Amino acid sequence: MGIGGFHIGQKPTEDEAIRIVRTALDSGVNFLDNCWDYNDGRSEIRMGKALRDGYREKAFLMSKIDGHSKVAAARQIDESLQRLQTDHVDLMQFHEIIRPDDPEKVFGAKWFAGSHAGGPKSGAKCATSVFTGHKSPDIHLHMLELARTHGFHFDTVQMPLNVMDAHYASFTRKVLPVLVQEEIGVLGMKPIGSGKIMESKTVEAIECLHYAIESADECGHHRFVIPWPCWSKPSRPRALSSPMEEQEVAALLARTAPVATEG
């Protein structure tokens, strides 16, 4: 389980955001999500301040870029490093692969030419390569297909895993099995859909988190992280409690089906 970076930039105060990040790291939750464009850079700036005083050494730090050319990507990476106050990130993603031609743009820029993911690169600012998207599982599958065509293997892929996804254009059903087969790490996101799922009045937030974790367990996949949008003291013990039983998952899906089947 990790900490989502988008909401860190929206907390009422910078001090609260810093406290949330450090509380997570002190509790052993060490995966930190972020992005170059979150809240006009405020999310990375706040996280960078939280990582001072030795906290960077406790964190597996991830961020994202939007640039699909080498020049744009390099500029955004440098800006992210400055904001995050570090000389490298452990995971860098191509953000929002959500349009039908996005995979062609990424591979057309030859960003991955002659490169294979699989561990830290000598002298690199980013240790691993990833892409993320949240609109269409078919676009994810196309990105993976192009990767195979170019002889490239992604380290991880980020996608929505939640109780509504299971019923419509499902990343869980279409993409997750491919990632397991190809031994690509899974990063789940949008466990509560930025709060939209809660508006359905069918589930509790903690059920959403446990369902997302269960989604990976069902496929026997153990390299899995789901960023959680907050890490407040009241939610912490429940977030770390036992996952759902099989019958609980079935009941949850039955509850959410009526509001999710039409997308």
Image (spheres, rainbow, N blue to C red):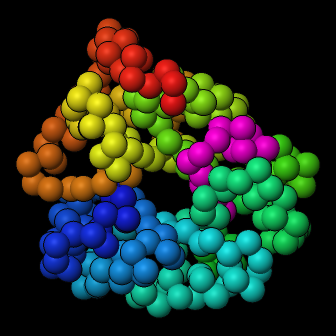
Q: Residue furthest top?
A: 247
Pick the residue in front: 199 or 5.
Answer: 199
Left/right of residue 235 with respect to residue 78 in the rendered view: left
Q: Position of residue 38 (x, y in %)?
A: 43, 72
Left/right of residue 202 with respect to residue 89 in the rendered view: left
Q: Position of residue 93 (x, y in %)?
A: 60, 64
Tell me the residue at 43%/80% (across/down): 40
Q: Position of residue 200 (x, y in %)?
A: 29, 31
Tell me the residue at 53%/88% (across/down): 79
Q: Magenta residues, as a range?
A: 129-142
Q: Total number of numbered labels?
A: 0
Left/right of residue 26 with respect to residue 248 in the rendered view: left
Tell me the residue at 22%/41% (across/down): 239
Left/right of residue 165 with respect to residue 49 in the rendered view: right
Q: Residue furthest left?
A: 234
Pick the residue in front: 218 or 71.
Answer: 71
**Is 69 in the magenta?**
no
Pick the residue in front: 102 or 116.
Answer: 102
- In this rendering, does residue 53 appear at all? yes
- In this rendering, does residue 32 appear at all? no
Pick the residue in front: 24 or 106.
Answer: 106
Tell me the residue at 50%/42% (across/down): 160
- Residue 87, relative to residue 69: is it above or below? below
Q: Position of residue 104 (x, y in %)?
A: 84, 58
Q: For residue 29, which quarter of the picture?
A: bottom left
Q: For residue 249, which quarter of the picture?
A: top left
- Residue 217, relative to residue 206: is it above or below? above
Q: Residue furthest front?
A: 262
- Residue 223, relative to residue 49: is it above or below? above
